[in-house]
Image: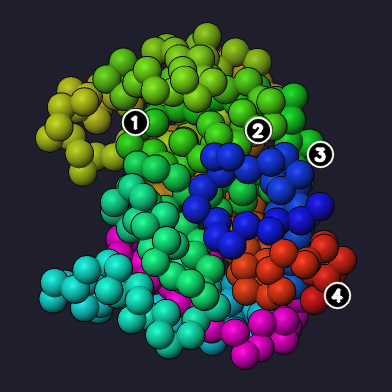
């Protein structure tokens, strides 16, 4: 098992063996975060650039922590602090950064396809997609899969229900690709304006009511209702949305009593998920965040160290 691709641009098109390899490698890194001294020399001398041209708390900080835990030099560039605000193109920015010889460029960008575009122009650095427009958020899907695997002991043969603004969710799209690879059953529940036909083509069954969508689900994925887009009139208002689609304990108890709940965050209490669920025993949210560091350590390690030659035993040694 290995991952020999030069970049990680999405989950789409990955082989099951590659997913297993990435998760096995990440699992080996979980223990480092639980040690009193959370530092290993694995990536000493390597340089990671985090180019985040869109806001992020979890993804940006966990890629930074991941690199630093492995002793890499980590440079963070944000939207306002980058020369893209002065009119420099993304390609010129990427080429400028590559001239400084980074091993990995991690990029979050509001435009779908931006990581793919820069990967075509960089000849030495690996590109990792940290979320691009409405396209994909592969490291989020991988950390969610790791969390599911730790909790249920498997990542296949599952019923997954995704609730919320799937239309504007790159997490939902990466999940759909992932569950197709794993052979899981996926149900999407959202207002008709957000549950678009594209998701059927990715293997999802679409529902407009919580009950039938959640029936017997092993995992419920709560997704943020992107209220900054309310002016686009996809839902009348947040109260109306919330009445019908909030992930709450009574609904889970009735339709999916044994389910566990994931939320990639940021999540909005009282709109998409109740505090009772977010802070309750079904919630895997804190575990997701913790696993985010381990998954990103695995990605940086695989992308920057002896690409194509690694086995999970190398990660065990770290
Ligand atoms: N889940 C996620 O991508 O969160 P951030 O936007 O905070 O990185």
Asked whether disc 4 touches disc 3, contact meaning CB atoms under 8 Å apart, the reply is no
Residue 11 locus on image (x, y percent)? 56, 44
Label 2 Cα neighbours within 10 Å, binned few <14 / some 14-19 / many ≥20 = some
* Label whose residue precedes the other's in the sequence (2 or 3): 3
Residue position marked by numbered label 4 in the rendering: 317
Residue at left 74%, top 24%? Answer: 157
Q: What separation in Å lies between label 4 and label 3 (alpha carbons)?
A: 24 Å
Residue position marked by numbered label 2 in the rendering: 181
Label 4 Cα neighbours within 10 Å, binned few <14 / some 14-19 / many ≥20 = few
Q: What separation in Å lies between label 3 and label 1 (alpha carbons)?
A: 30 Å
Question: SS for tag 4?
Answer: helix
Label 3 Cα neighbours within 10 Å, binned few <14 / some 14-19 / many ≥20 = few
Quarter occupied by the C terminus:
bottom right
Q: Image quadrant of residue 234?
A: top left
Residue at left 51%, top 15%? Answer: 205
Residue at left 62%, top 31%? Answer: 179
Residue position marked by numbered label 1 in the rendering: 167
Q: From the viewer's perspective, is residue 200 above or below residue 29?
A: above
Question: SS for tag 3?
Answer: loop
Question: SS for tag 2?
Answer: helix
Q: Is residue 130 visible?
A: no
Q: What separation in Å lies between label 2 and label 3 (alpha carbons)?
A: 17 Å
| Mark 3 vs mark 1: in front | 1
* Label whose residue precedes the other's in the sequence (1 or 4): 1
What span is colored magenta in the figure?
35-63
Residue 149 locus on image (x, y percent)? 74, 42
* Label whose residue precedes the other's in the sequence (3 or 1): 3
């Amino acid at each position: 098992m290995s991952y020999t691709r030069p970049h990680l641009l999405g989950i789409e098109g990955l082989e099951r063996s590659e997913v297993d390899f990435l998760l096995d490698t990440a699992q080996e890194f979980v223990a480092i975060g639980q040690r009193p001294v959370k530092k290993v020399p694995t990536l000493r001398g390597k340089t990671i650039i985090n180019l985040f041209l869109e806001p992020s708390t979890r993804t940006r900080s966990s890629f930074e922590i991941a690199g630093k835990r492995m002793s890499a030099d980590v440079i963070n560039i944000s939207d306002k602090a980058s020369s893209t605000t002065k009119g420099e193109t993304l390609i010129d920015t990427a080429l400028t950064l590559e001239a400084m010889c980074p091993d990995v460029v991690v990029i979050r960008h509001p435009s779908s396809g931006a990581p793919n575009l820069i990967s075509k122009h960089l000849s030495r650095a690996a590109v990792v997609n940290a979320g691009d427009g409405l396209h994909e958020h592969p490291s989020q899907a991988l950390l969610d899969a790791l969390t599911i695997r730790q909790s249920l002991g498997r990542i296949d043969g599952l019923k997954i229900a995704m609730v919320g603004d799937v239309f504007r969710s790159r997490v939902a799209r990466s999940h759909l690709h992932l569950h197709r690879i794993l052979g899981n059953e996926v149900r999407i529940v959202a207002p008709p304006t957000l549950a678009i036909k594209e998701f059927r083509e990715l293997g999802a069954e679409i529902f407009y009511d919580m009950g039938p969508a959640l029936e017997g689900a092993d995992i419920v994925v709560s997704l943020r209702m992107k209220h900054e887009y309310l002016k686009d009139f996809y839902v009348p208002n947040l109260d109306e949305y919330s009445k019908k689609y909030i992930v709450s304990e009574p609904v889970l108890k009735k339709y999916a009593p044994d389910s566990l709940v994931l939320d990639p965050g940021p999540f909005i209490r009282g709109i998409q998920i109740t505090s009772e669920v977010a802070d309750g025993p079904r919630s895997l949210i804190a575990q997701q965040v913790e696993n985010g560091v381990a998954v990103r350590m695995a990605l940086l390690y695989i992308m920057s160290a002896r690409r194509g030659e690694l086995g999970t035993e190398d990660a065990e040694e770290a």
